[in-house]
Amino acid sequence: MRVARRTFLAATVAAVAAPVVLRLARADTPQFTLKLHHAFSAVSCGHDRFLVPWARRIEAQSDRRIRIDIFPSMALGGQPAALFDQARDGLADIVWAAPSNTPGRFAKIETFELPFVPSRRALVSSKAIQDFAEVNLKDEFREVRPLCFSCTDRGVLHAAQPIQTVGDVEGLKLQVRTRLAGEAVRALGAHPVAMPSAQLPIAINRHVVDGCVDPWDMVPALKLHELLKAHTEFADSSLSMTTLVLAMNKTAYERLPADLRKVIDDNSGQRAAGMAGTMWDLQATAVTNMVTQRGDSIITLLPEAVVRWRKATDPVIEAWQKQMKEQKVDGGKLIAGVRALLAKYADEPEPQPPQPPQPKEPRPPVEAKPELRPSAAVEVPLDAPAAPVVKPAPAVPAAPAAPAAPAPKPAPTATIAPPAPTLTPMQPLHSPATPAAPMVPPQPPAPAVAPPVPVLKPPPAAVSPPKTLDIPL
């Protein structure tokens, strides 16, 4: 019967706990898994400092019901130019793509890639393009759900020799990243060369190109600081800039419940754009500091010196406006709107890298250690003999006969006990009987009394009267 009862109880407990285990298992398993695809490497700042934190924030705010798997370096296949179509067709749930990889397909967003139109700061341009997109880019990106738009940091002229004037650029072969950057380089008298960024170091070593127009984040990634020692940038605006869009498949978004769609929305728009722009600016600051420490020259042209550069590239803007006019789009109005938005966010504070002051915190406990030393201050009474002298003072009448001769004899008794140093100052003041009493309160001090017995032998006369007194009793 006992075995049966135990079996019944175990089965009952298991049946009751089974739903709890299933609930916990379901809670640990994400309900929706999204694939995020992009062309940047896994060690790039865009992947490590923007996409990964952004995805982990969504996972945390959804209570792990959403899981975002990130595939860098085109791990799901295809070319960077196909990312937008992958998001549209559902081959990837989310993509981070550069519209400039498909020239002419997204004409309006090219406004931010015109020469000397965007700001030199990625944060300012990213916030401006997000507002710009909400008004002007809905038709161009209607096949997907845009989550945020952003811009890389400023395009910098990297070359072997310093470039200070338009004349210094003439005849150089420069690698470019966008169509309009190539047009601007050609207007300056140089020869634009379009090639994948991964091939740029080899092209420089083989003198296929003399330099490039790339943002600062590409310098450490391609080790350009080891190949090109002169860098020229512009104070207020940028010669070129690359736009980016974080887009989501419409079906993947719509199949999410309302509360999870809200999580995606809360991490889209200006919040995500500001996050991306801050990342680019922080990386640009870190790279410029590194390049300066290496001794490379960084030339920043002031607005007065950029006037000739602007005039030389004005034909590029005029040609783009004609192209937009053919599509029945007012390009001048778009440029004016962009400049107004850039002025709106021009006062955004410069992002500062986090500086955790944690190494300084362990020092205070070191200063607290001396506070433990007073706990061992029990030895302090040794330095002040007055305190122990007061205690044995009432014991003086307990030893009426204290001759000076026995004074040296208690010394061995004091050496036997550990606290002998405390008794040494008491010996010249009082009889040996006083130290024996405070050291051992019980009867064991009797052997110490035995030595005084010979002291009673010298006075025999004092012994006889007590005997006569005992007879009448």
Image (cartoon, helix red, strand yellow):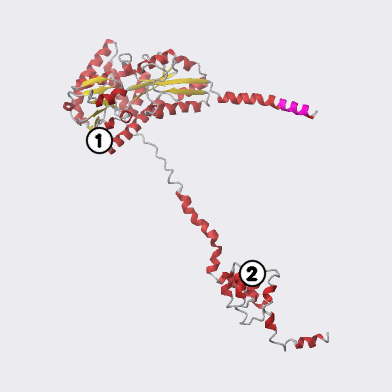
* For residue 332, above or below residue 227: above
User: Does residue 52 appear in the picture of this structure?
Assistant: yes
Residue at figure coordinates x 54%, y 62% from the top left = 377
Name the kind of residue labelled 1 in the image. Answer: Asp
Name the kind of residue labelled 2 in the image. Answer: Met
* For residue 377, above or below residue 120: below
- Badge 2 crowding class, 10 Å Cα cut-off, few under 14, some 14 to 19, many 20 or more, is some
> What label does residue 219 carry, if any?
none
Residue at figure coordinates x 45%, y 18% from the top left = 93
Helix, strand or loop at label 2? It is helix
Q: Quadrant of residue 294?
A: top left
Residue at figure coordinates x 28%, y 35% from the top left = 291
Q: Quadrant of residue 103?
A: top left
Q: Outermost residue toward the right?
A: 472
The residue singled out by tag 1 in the image is 296
The residue singled out by tag 2 in the image is 439
> Split into 4 quadrants, where in the image is the N terminus?
top right
Q: What is the span of residues highlighted in magenta in the rendered image?
A: 3-12
